[in-house]
Amino acid sequence: MTQSRSFSTTLALSLALSLVTLAPSPASAQQGIRGQVLPSHTMLRRHGLVRMWWGQAKLDPSRDVVAHIVVDEDIVVVQATSGTVTAFDNESGRRIWSAQLGPRDAPSQPAVTNRDFAFIPSARRLYCLDKFSGELLWELKLPRTPSTSPAVSEDQIFYGSHDGSIFAFDLHRIRELYLKNELSKWGFLARQWRYKTGKQITTPPIVTNRVVNFASLDNSLYSITAGSPRLQWQSETDSPVSAPITYHGGFLYIACEDFNLYCLNAENGNSRWQPFPSGFPIRRTPRVIGQQVFIFPNSGGLFALSALTGKRTWWRHGIEEYVGASHQRLYTADHVGNIVILRRKDGAVLGTMPLRQFGVKFPNNRTDRLFLATNSGLLVAIREAGADREFPTYHQNPDLLPILPEFAPETPAPAAPAQPAAPAAPAGDNGTTTTPNN
């Protein structure tokens, strides 16, 4: 009997020790997958930030790395070099779908999205998936290999090629042919038009209400009517365009190899202001947030310009990349990959976070969320702290912002002034209040 009790006690202690061993240590709360370290809550709180979520894209870390990250107002799309694509919900971080698209290790371009669909070019094929379910809706063999990402509207998709051609396809016609199982044979019928320039298309097309804008290595910027290949206007530059073009508020922001930034009206090509001379090569996309333009010349720091005049408002040395922006702050990266937080008003440094292990920093100019990833596909989403930051700010498409619930004011309304009390009525014989008869 004593021996049995001793054995039971030993077994209970062993189980307890096992449970303690299996329980996560406090440090493991900051670990991602395969021991990758996430930004700590303590560090983020110090800078007024919170970690929304983290997730792991589907890829083989022994051979794959992240090739592209694309973010819109709804989802995050992570593309691996192997062709595996993973999509996460923007706000919750839920992994909603993953797919292998195209031949393994085929060259690809960054995905593009519209309200309902995600379009992913791989080799000479274009894949269309339901943005929220990942269902493959169709795939189209392209007439030329893409040289840039495509651009998409609700009805059309456009892409540029190495031979200098821009192609426009009818999305509704593509879907009709696919449902009839005729897309592989008759896909060319969905092509609306082709416009040929002198040299390779170097920037992703920009689609506005009526026109498509793009640049070519022939030192020209083109504006073509979206419905037909009719030239609206052409602007010749002294040197090739050196970075993807930015469209904001009806204007195009164009960086050229002559180290200048130009601002043109997208409808007619007229200059809004005199070119801004940065003095350094501009290889990164200009970013426009509100009435500010941010450019990041190579080894030239960060210039903040007025979108209305093109005049410099401030400059900050040592900054290499744009990461994100909120109402008051600008999030950037330095030459070693640290996140540097600046005040948008004057460029003052508000703080620095050592996050160089996140080598892929998505330049988010659509919302105020920050999205960082490691080369092996560990993705983390960060936002500013505070109840008023739980819903994202939409920089680029404010009309897409859903109707937000109204919150009660934090301070109670002032109380109404007290009313004078009515005189008490005389008491009756039974002690109850009585009302005198008239």
Image (spheres, rainbow, N blue to C red):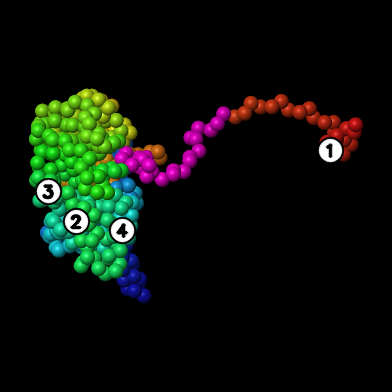
> Which comes sooner in the sequence, label 2 or label 4?
2
Bounds of the magenta span? Answer: 389-414
Q: Position of residue 141 (x, y in %)?
A: 18, 61
Q: Which of pointers 2 and 4 indicates the residue nearer the eye?
A: 4
> Which comes sooner in the sequence, label 1 or label 3?
3
Marks 3 and 1: in contact by CB < 8 Å? Answer: no
Residue at numbered disc 3: 164
Q: How many marks?
A: 4
Q: Which of pointers 2 and 1 indicates the residue nearer the eye?
A: 2
Q: Is residue 134 visible?
A: no
Q: Quarter of the image holding residue 212? A: top left
Marks 1 and 2: in contact by CB < 8 Å? Answer: no
CA gap, disc 2 and disc 4: 18 Å
Vertically, is 20 above or below 435?
below
Residue at numbered disc 2: 121
Q: Amino acid at mark 3?
A: Gly
Q: Which of pointers 3 and 2 indicates the residue nearer the eye?
A: 3
Q: Quarter of the image holding residue 236? A: top left
**Which residue lies at the image location 24% right of the left edge and 29% below the top edge?**
272
Quarter of the rendering occupied by the N terminus: bottom left
The secondary structure that dominates the magenta segment is: loop
Specify few, some or many for label 2: CA neighbours under 10 Å numbering under 14, 14-19, or 20 or more: many
> Which comes sooner in the sequence, label 2 or label 1?
2
Q: Amino acid at mark 4?
A: His
Q: Which of pointers 1 and 3 indicates the residue nearer the eye?
A: 3
Residue at numbered disc 1: 432
